[in-house]
């Protein structure tokens, strides 16, 4: 899969606490990972960097090449990294309370496995239609799932800023897992919550489909986010499945 990504501080923040990278393991399988640090001055950027670099390093040393082994590996790595972040925060007073969201994609020859914790997202674009694969772990979405508020109310509800599951702070680090088949010409899009705050799903879809290439699409989406206010850090990663290959 061809992959392009970029990250930007945005228009309102002084520093970028997002982190993104791509890694390849011993079997040639790719892992893409996007993190959004939580905790303000208490080390959100440290938590995001730790999660991406530690999990990415473990992936590079692995030989994972099946869906089931990938799922088990993802659960183990997320739990292990949560313990590491919690213990590091307890050791250093300046990092107390640090945490991060996390969305990870394991990309096999013709299969995609997603692990998600927090409100960073993964989408798939297929046959000119886009579908969100992940579920946001925030208060607004939990209220929506319970039927306490409507979809329209969830868009502006203050609870959309309250993360209910994250990496760090507590022992509850269970990620959601999703697995789908990949087909030629599929797109995988991963992003921190900075972009969906400002750019609609329809706008995202049309931008990806009309761009010159995926790198151009990434640049356009970040620009559109900032032009619409850029109230948060923004990170966008797009993968294009040109054929049934890594």
Image (spheres, helix red, strand yellow):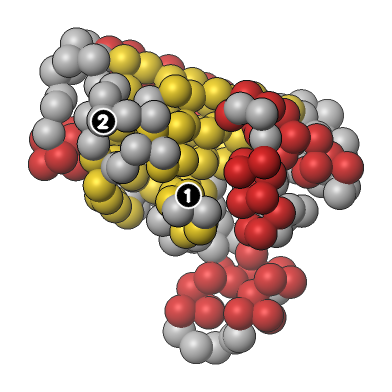
Q: Which image quadrant for residue 207?
A: top right
Residue for point 61% across, 80% down: 151
What is the number of the mark on residue 176? none
Q: Position of residue 35 (x, y in %)?
A: 52, 34
Q: Position of residue 8 (x, y in %)?
A: 73, 28
Q: Are marks 1 and 2 in contact (CB under 8 Å)?
A: no
Residue for point 68% across, 80% down: 152
- Would you say residue 110 is visible in this rendering? yes
Residue with the mark numbered 2: 244
Q: Is residue 94 left or right of residue 243?
A: right
Q: Which image quadrant for residue 245?
A: top left
Task: Pick the quarter of the image with the C terminus.
Answer: top left
For the image, the number of numbered tags is: 2
Q: Does residue 189 lie above or below 23 as drawn?
A: below
Q: Position of residue 128 (x, y in %)?
A: 52, 54
- Would you say residue 123 is visible in this rendering? no
Q: Is residue 9 left or right of residue 7?
A: right
Label 1 CA crowd tier, 10 Å (few <14, some 14–19, many 20+): some
Residue with the mark numbered 1: 125
């Amino acid at each position: 899969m061809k992959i392009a990504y970029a990250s930007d501080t945005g228009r309102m923040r002084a520093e970028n606490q997002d982190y993104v990278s791509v890694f390849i393991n011993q079997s040639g399988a790719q892992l893409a990972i996007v993190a959004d640090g939580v905790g303000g001055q208490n080390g959100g950027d440290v938590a995001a960097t730790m999660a991406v670099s530690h999990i990415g390093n473990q992936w590079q040393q692995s030989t994972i090449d099946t869906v089931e082994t990938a799922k088990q590996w993802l659960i183990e790595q997320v739990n292990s990294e949560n313990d590491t972040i919690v213990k590091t925060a307890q050791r250093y007073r300046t990092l107390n309370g640090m945490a991060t969201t996390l969305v990870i994609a394991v990309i096999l020859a013709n299969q995609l496995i997603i692990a998600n914790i927090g409100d960073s997202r993964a989408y798939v674009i297929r046959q000119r239609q886009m579908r969100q694969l992940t579920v946001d772990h925030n208060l607004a979405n939990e209220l929506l799932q319970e039927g306490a508020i409507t979809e329209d109310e969830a868009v502006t509800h203050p609870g959309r800023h309250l993360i209910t599951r994250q990496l760090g702070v507590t022992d509850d680090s269970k990620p959601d897992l999703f697995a789908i088949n990949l087909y030629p010409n599929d797109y995988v899009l991963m992003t921190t919550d900075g972009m969906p705050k400002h750019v609609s799903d329809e706008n995202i879809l049309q931008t990806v489909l009309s761009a010159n290439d995926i790198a151009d699409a990434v640049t356009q989406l970040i620009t559109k986010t900032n032009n619409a206010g850029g109230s948060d850090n923004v990170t966008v990663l797009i993968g294009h499945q040109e054929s049934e290959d890594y």
